[in-house]
Amino acid sequence: MSARSELTIVQLTDTHLRPAGELLRGAVDTHANLTRVLTLLREAGRPIDALVLSGDLTDDGSPEAYRRLREAVEPVAAELDAQIVYAMGNHDERVAFAVELLDREPGTVDPDQPHDQRTEIDGLRVITLDSTTPHRHDGYLEPEQLVWLAAQLREPAPRGTLLILHHPPLPSSVPATDLLKLDNADELAAVVAGTDVRMILCGHNHLTAAAALAGIPVWIGPALAYRLDPMAPVGRQRGFFGFGYSRVDLVGETILATAIEATPAEAVYDRAEDEILDQIVAHVAQAR
């Protein structure tokens, strides 16, 4: 019997939506990328407990772009019976983000205050930290945010904690992404070390990568907008067409992140799952 996921979360990051009729960098229809992924999730017919959108949800912070995002995501989430968690990225704008996605009243949002949130998903505590600073593209967590996080983590959650922030708390071998990482990762490490944080989920870099902070897995999910080339020729930086998303599963004591390709492509094979599993079981039994 194969292991079954007890909880499935889909991470969508760096959607970079723009107002209707506008392309990202004059070339990428990010709304089409997003709607394709949402269609794939609906057609898969698999249980999804939450959709986590981990920053750079719009490219320009415009209210219209946030409304386009919400109009695309929320009907699909309702159909899947999945919670939605929105997190800030450096391309997002705090006031429009709060009004359009968090249903805050206009005029009540302080642009100097970060949007940190706590959500419970069937025993899993999901904490989002706003790692942005207005008018900057690198990441930073204020001392007050780290104090708040420490207070949240003081008592363990039944299924542990998933921490979401846009900027990876990691160095990078790609010069541009290294300059734009979370500046005070060491301070975050001191807070999360020894707690029930099971994974730190990030975006921002437009590439897929994994490492650890204070012994905790860190996952940088693939962007929905376009891909950064991590092996570009010396002296060059380039982005490619292509996009994807991540699936995060709780399987027993394990938390597993999987990058999923969403760029249209021809399948190598498409067979019944039971047929494949029966074939594998028979092969394993024969080998033993």
Image (cartoon, helix red, strand yellow):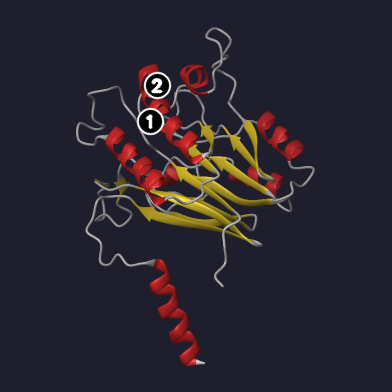
Q: Position of residue 70 (x, y in %)?
A: 43, 26
In this view, 202 is above or below 66 = below
Residue drawn at 50 percent across, 44 percent down: 202
With 247 as the anchor, is 142 left or right in this view? Answer: right
Residue drawn at 49 percent across, 23 percent down: 101
Residue 57 in view (yes/no)? yes
Structural crowding at the residue carrying mark 1, measured as other residues with C-alpha within 10 Å and reported as few (<14), some (14–19) or many (≥20) = some
Could you say whether the residue bearing mark 2 is in a helix, strand or loop?
helix
Query: In this orientation, which residue lies closer to the viewer: 130 or 225?
Result: 225
With 117 as the anchor, is 139 left or right in this view? Answer: left
Question: Mark 2 near mark 1, Cβ–Cβ under 8 Å?
Answer: no
Q: Position of residue 112 (x, y in %)?
A: 57, 18
- Extreme residue toward the right, this view: 155
Query: In this orientation, which residue lies closer to the viewer: 284 or 153?
Result: 284
Specify the amino acid type for callout 2.
Arg
Specify the amino acid type for callout 1.
Ala
Quarter of the image containing the N terminus? bottom right
Q: Which residue is mark 1?
A: 72
| Residue 67 tag number | 2
Q: Position of residue 188 (x, y in %)?
A: 64, 43
Total marks in image: 2
Could you say whether the residue bearing mark 1 is in a helix, strand or loop?
helix
In terms of sequence position, does the residue under pointer 2 or pointer 1 come before the other?
Answer: 2
Q: CA distance from mark 2 to mark 1?
A: 9 Å
In this view, 211 is above or below 287 = above
Residue drawn at 45 percent across, 30 percent down: 74
